[in-house]
Amino acid sequence: MNGAETLLRTLLNSGVDTCFANPGTSEMHFVAALDRVPGMRPVLGLFEGVVAGAADGYARMADKPAATLFHLGPGLGNGLSQLHNAMRARTPIVNVVGEHATWHRQYETPLASDVVAYARPVSGWLRTCASSRLLATDARDAVRAAHGPPGQIASLILPADCSWNEAGEPAPALEPTRRPKVDQAVLDHLEKVLRSGEPVVVLMNGAAVRADGLEAASRLANATGARVFADTFTPRLQRGAGRSPVERFPRYPDQGAALLGEATHLILVETVPPVGFFAYPDQPSWLTPDSCHIHTLAAPGEDSVGALEQLCHRLGAATDGATVQASSVPEPASGDLTPQTVGQSIAAHLPEGAIVSDEAVTSRGGLPEATAGCPPHDWLSLTGGALGGGLPMGIGAAVACPDRKVLCLQADGAGMYNVQSLWTMARERLDITIVVYANRSYRILHNEFDRLGLGEVGASARALMDIGNPELDWTSLARGMGVEAHRIESTDAFNTHFAAAMREHGPRMLEVVL
């Protein structure tokens, strides 16, 4: 069999059965092999940002990597912003990046580029296939590296002749990976810290902000008085009625520094010490004061849930001692159409098992608080701060979990970064509802302008922060790509259409005009 067939069979043997792709000439043998090798689901994105973001959302929900297929260096370059988000989320992804044939790379063709240089900043593992005979081993190594733990992006650069040349048998299946246990000496030390009576803040991410980790952390907090926070942006937070709630660490540096200023100890669970998202004049970048001692319970990829449970046992935390979020579902809102009323109405109708892809940015309007007591659901955040991830992540989540409703909360400006996502949603008939907050502005830039104390926004500055001239017509954009869409101008209309979207299957978009 040729290299492309060997590659596909090796990926499938290792459990990678979905490929988000935007291929070109150098990847045509891979494309052709899809017809000869059953089992791989190909999903086309009309822009590489869609491809990368969808792979990110898929792996966050499937707990295994998807493959991507990019066309040479420029194609990979188009996906880098969403690969940046995936890197920050420690998402497992196997990038297959096409390259010119080995003997063709010496020529300065129009698409020649340094693919390795493009891939390196976002890749935890990186290799260029040197021969089709090595492709099975390379592919298996890429999947193993992507799995971690912790997860990471593994990029395999594939010269075209390695796809079409004879390659031999695929590699066998990988052994399941296990998270390494936390050293007992670490637990001994942190048991003493938590028994000291000194103020402790616990900051968590990764597996620790799933249901089992949150329950253990809540038991620990209630037994010791420690305060527990999730990182500001988490890859996948499990929340809702019956689960243990957790506060988010403040985004702005003055708030974070004030919180940690009251602590003697900061315990990190699958995360790193918090720093300011941006620099601001006269505010700290490093938020932990010298008086606060930093400890690591579990590094990213370690068995953080097991470590939390062991600390609970050591400290005598009651097995039923976790705080549990009560069920609390509001009535649909009435009155003026605002982010707050939209949030209340979303909470009124959010179904059990929903997956929320959150890129509402400034328009959340208290939505996290309103949905706290809704039926159990998962919340996906923009971990790396690169805009444009909300819609593609929704694609990946819906492909990974076809029996669950996906809700994309989408700011209108950020949504335009990867608006082609709508076409893929329609083509794949994914069960996604998109709520677009149409405020005709990069509102986050106005907020940052104010925080930096830059005074009044003048005409030239406004030209770079407002997007209302001409106004984006999201309803027409969605319909033009095959997605049912409705323009919403009243709270009553939102209640009607959102309730219908939660009952019915398929992609649907609500453009909320604010």
Image (cartoon, rainbow, N blue to C red):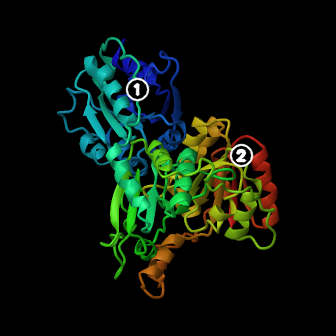
Between disc 2 and disc 1, the foreground one is 2
The amino acid sitting under disc 1 is Met
Residue 260 seen: yes
Determine the secondary structure under disc 2. loop
Would you name the residue on which mark 2 appears?
A: 352
Residue furthest out toward the left: 106
Residue 420 seen: no
Q: Are marks 2 and 1 in contact (CB under 8 Å)?
A: no
User: Residue 117 falls in which quadrant of the image?
Assistant: top left
Q: Please rate how many residues cluster around mark 2, counting C-alpha atoms within 10 Å: few if below 14, some from 14 to 19, many from 20.
A: some
- Distance from the alpha carbon under mark 2 to that under mark 1: 42 Å
Determine the secondary structure under disc 1. helix
- Pick the front one: 240 or 332: 240
**68 displayed left or right of 323:** left
433 up-or-down from 37: above or below: below
User: Residue 274 falls in which quadrant of the image?
Assistant: bottom left
Q: Position of residue 440 (x, y in %)?
A: 59, 69
**99 displayed left or right of 394:** left
Q: Position of residue 442 (x, y in %)?
A: 52, 69
Which image quadrant: the N terminus?
Answer: top left
The numbered dot on residue 28 is: 1
